[in-house]
Image (spheres, rainbow, N blue to C red):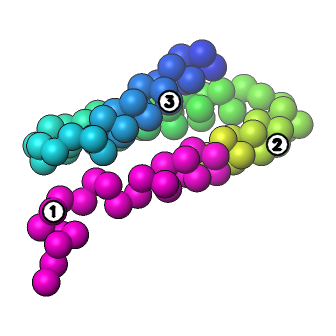
């Protein structure tokens, strides 16, 4: 289950990165929807994993997940405004 979750997280990140790089709005929306789908799958699977853990393991896993989320947000924060179309960034 954990390996499957990790694979889905990687797939979600891949779709988000592709969406940031594409210029086509329809393709970007499709990629973001696919990433959202994988995010929901990860959340569901993570809930199953968490429900089978004992409280000590759960606390350690939550701390690790929070650290991973912070690292991902810091990494993705660098390219934050590259996804905006020209008509939004070039307002006059």
Q: Position of residue 42 (x, y in %)?
A: 50, 32
Q: Please give the name of the residue rendered at 24% of the width and 59% of the height, measured from the top-left corner.
A: 84
Distance in Å between CA atoms under marks 3 and 1: 30 Å
Q: Please give the name of the residue rendered at 69% of the width and 33% of the height, measured from the top-left corner.
A: 50
| Residue where numbered disc 1 is placed | 86
| Residue where numbered disc 2 is placed | 59
Q: For the stretch drawn in magenta, what is the main secondary structure?
A: helix
Query: Answer yes or no: do the residues labelled 3 and 1 have beta carbons within 8 Å?
Result: no
Distance in Å between CA atoms under marks 2 and 1: 44 Å
Question: Residue 9 — which label?
Answer: 3
Q: Secondary structure at mark 2?
A: helix
Distance in Å between CA atoms under marks 2 and 3: 20 Å
Crowdedness near tag 3: few (<14), some (14–19) or many (≥20) residues, C-alpha within 10 Å: some
Viewer-proximal residue among 63 and 74: 74
Q: Secondary structure at mark 3?
A: helix
Q: Which residues are magenta?
A: 70-92
Residue 67 visible in rendering: yes
Which is nearer the N-term, disc 2 or disc 3? 3
Which is nearer the N-term, disc 3 or disc 1? 3
Crowdedness near tag 2: few (<14), some (14–19) or many (≥20) residues, C-alpha within 10 Å: few
């Amino acid at each position: 289950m954990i390996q499957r979750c990790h694979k889905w997280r990687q797939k979600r990140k891949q779709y988000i990165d592709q969406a940031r790089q594409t210029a086509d709005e329809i393709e970007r929306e499709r990629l973001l929807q696919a990433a959202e789908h994988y995010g929901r799958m990860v959340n569901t699977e993570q809930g199953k994993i968490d429900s089978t853990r004992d409280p000590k393991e759960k606390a350690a896993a939550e701390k690790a997940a929070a650290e991973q989320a912070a690292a991902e947000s810091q990494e993705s924060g660098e390219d934050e405004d590259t996804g905006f179309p020209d008509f939004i960034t070039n307002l006059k």
